[in-house]
Amino acid sequence: MSARHRLLYVTDLAYPARGRRYGDEDVHLTARLRESFDLALCHPLDAAALMDGFDAVVVRNSGPVLGYQQEYEAFRAQALARGTRVYNPLHGRGDMAGKQYLLDLTAAGFPVIPTVDRPEDLHRLPEAAQYAVKPKAGADSIGLRFLPYEDLAGLAYGDVLVQPRVDFRYEVSFYFVDDLFQYALYAPDPERRWVLEPYEPTAEDLALARRFIDWNTLDHGIQRVDACRAPDGELLLVELEDLNPYLSLDRVPEDTRERFATAFADSLRRFLAA
């Protein structure tokens, strides 16, 4: 009988996320993963010190890295230097690498909320009553603010992004394991973004979500594509979360939740065999 792989599962079980319960989600997922792997949980601040004793590190609900940026960078550097397997792999092009991808996708003509980071590019944004200003290294709406156009010229550019504030009808999220679609959820009320309900995507919806999954080129991992339905009906990318996306598994039926856990375990087996 072959030895079971050892996984270090990184999560902040006590992180106070508004409208979300990180701990519950990871307790459920790790209970299922223990059927196939030898597994230990640790706080993100302990990952670098512990990871050498495991076959892979699985980064899950570890919270916004803004709160421990220096420690996270040290973890990344150590993992890359030692060839440690990290899931999701560290070459993700989405939120894992900051918000630069919003600029890249805007320039490439992808269906994304138009984004600029220089005052000389402000004219490229569509007219709006207000504009969203967010840190390039932001997460979880930390540092987000809304300003009128006349206040944008005085910003300290270089570390911030500017987007028009879209009067969207609703937000919808598509959840993938590797390149396999699992389920979608949406927030019918834009003012209650974490009150989610199951969403039945159209073929066009899934084709859009897959464009961003394909663009990111991650062979293994969990990704969440967040989009908003603009007033004209178009779906626009809000965020490509490829570091530690919360999965809102408490908002899906039990059979979907179990199917996701199975897909997660299968993905990890493929990852470890690659």
Image (tube, rainbow, N blue to C red):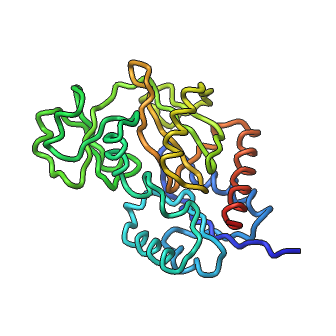
Q: Is residue 138 left or right of residue 83?
A: left
Which quadrant holds residue 210? top right
Q: Is residue 48 left or right of residue 197?
A: left
Which percent across, then down, holds residue 147? Answer: 20, 36
Which percent across, then down, holds residue 271? Answer: 66, 63
Residue at 33% in and 40% down: 106
Quarter of the rendering occupied by the C terminus: bottom right
The answer to whether residue 197 is above or below residue 157 is above
The answer to whether residue 194 is above or below residue 32 is above
Which percent across, then down, holds residue 156? Answer: 15, 52
Q: Is residue 43 left or right of residue 231?
A: right
Q: As drawn, which residue projects farthest toward the right?
A: 1
Which quadrant holds residue 144? top left
Quarter of the rendering occupied by the N terminus: bottom right
Which percent across, then down, holds residue 149? Answer: 16, 33
The answer to whether residue 4 is above or below residue 114 is below
Residue at 50% in and 37% down: 194
Q: Nearer the viewer, residue 263 or 132?
A: 263
